[in-house]
Image: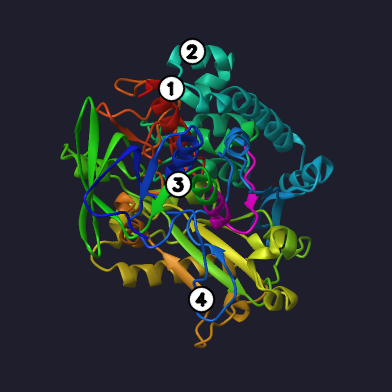
Amino acid sequence: MSVNQGTRAYDAVIVGAGHNGLVAAAYLARAGRSVLVLERLGHTGGAAVSSAPFAGVEARLSRYSYLVSLLPRKIVADLGLDFRLRSRTISSYTPVERAGRPTGLLVGGGEARTRDAFARLTGGAREYAAWQRFYGMTGRVAERVFPTLTEPLPTRDELRRRIDDESAWRALFEEPIGAAVEEYFEDDLVRGVVLTDALIGTFADAHDPSLAQNRCFLYHVIGGGTGAWDVPVGGMGALTDALAATARAAGAEIVTGHEAVRITGDESGAEVTYRTADGEGVAAARHVLVNAAPQELAALTGDTPPEPAEGAQLKVNMLLTRLPKLRDPDVDPREAFAGTFHIAEGYGQLATAHAQAAAGRLPAAPPSEIYCHSLTDPTILGPELAGRGYQTLTLFGLHTPARLFDGDNDGVREELLDATLAELDAHLAEPLADCLATDADGRPCIEAKTPLDLERDLRLPGGNIFHRALSWPYSQTDTGRWGVETPHPRVLLCGAGAVRGGGVSGVPGHNAAMAVLEQGA
């Protein structure tokens, strides 16, 4: 589908049909505004898509983004989305060898069961009590902070007063998160499990003075006011499909294969020049919302780009004929893989991996975490595969910054994948390779994406899944009322690089729409 060539006028033109752009489109169209969404790719969804990556295999995976925590129920309710989430009964499983025998820590399945798991691993009650205190603290912060994400930005002092807990404020907002982890916990494995939430897509040490790890940790524990990470039924594409349908039903025009190449404007309005296979066109608008990275925004407007961003993760999608057996005899693989399966993520291991990557080397023991979507939501598999017991695995690797892949992306990808799977195999009673399904051409059903792959496929700068370093959820210099404003009065940033962006949340899209509606004409 395409818009007519020449200049068309709209109330709002949105650049990019990822989930945030679609949220903004749906809100504005439902408010009676004329909306055009321009998408460069041949489909909507951006990084929040479901696709079948393996030839001839009926399995639609959440290929990039894969879990949901930060999407406010308010957005789902406001837009009347036909979209569901399922909770995971198991939070996590972390295998380890202690005293020469395989064991691990299973979190979930009820309080008594979790308490017993901590006692078996650590030999006492202290660590579980510390766990309850620590996550009681973060839970109280989550209850107070999460509702603010869809409100005008509070000041730092306003947010501090709202949290009303000085020890929590110090632990999360002022001191490196490593200090709190070490204060609360003694066991190396438990410390590592806690720290991982500070390192998802963020290349930082526990004690990094920039507090980048604290901001990452905060967004990972406040979602929904509880910090729970849920499984999207039908895969991540179910969300963006629902958003696109809602926006279109309200009157928004969404066109794919339309690449924005330039934005110009003044206080009265703006124009977006776009390119299609048939040539160029121009769309005029009272407001332009850019659902792309700040670097892309700068390229479109001719502004000086921000500091380069850098991603730091390996994303691996797999399809298995069965879940592998574990060396730990006390845990069922269907439980271990239902939550987050932590690999090489002890506290000391994470520090070593960071130091090695910072020195320009791949981590010798790459840390990563895995979960099985199909255990919670088998609808992503075709009936035949589901009936035969097939399962998906999603792996997310840490501490692999984009710089490590410069010069030989393909070669380093394979080396890192082999090393990462070797770390997993160390905790399995059978090689993962024996469980991998094959596609129609007889190839193993496994694909890996480096930061450079994400930059190429999705234009994520440096492969950074957040578009740039995450921000504190309060106002700072030049952040504007909603955190989406730019130096151009009629141009707003509605992507993950906005203040309070990152993750599958829809928050920047909501906030950009609110900023437009507040401005009136």
Between marks 3 and 2, how big is the CA–CA gap? 34 Å
Q: What x and y, as percent, mark residue 262?
A: 20, 45
Q: Which residue is mark 3?
A: 351
Q: Which residue is mark 1?
A: 474
Between marks 1 and 2, how big is the CA–CA gap? 8 Å
**Could you tell which of marks 1 and 2 lies nearer the N-terminus?**
2
Label 4: state its secondary structure. loop
Q: What x and y, as percent, mark residue 303?
A: 17, 37
Lateral position of residue 135 relative to residue 75, left or right:
right
Q: Residue at x 59, y 75 (%)?
A: 58
Between marks 2 and 4, how big is the CA–CA gap? 50 Å
Lateral position of residue 94 relative to residue 299, left or right:
right
The residue segment tinted magenta is 227-243
Work out whether residue 31 can be spotted: yes
Residues at marks 1 and 2 touching, judged by CB atoms closer than 8 Å: yes
Lateral position of residue 249 relative to residue 273, left or right:
right
Between marks 1 and 3, how big is the CA–CA gap? 29 Å
**Could you tell which of marks 2 and 4 lies nearer the N-terminus?**
4
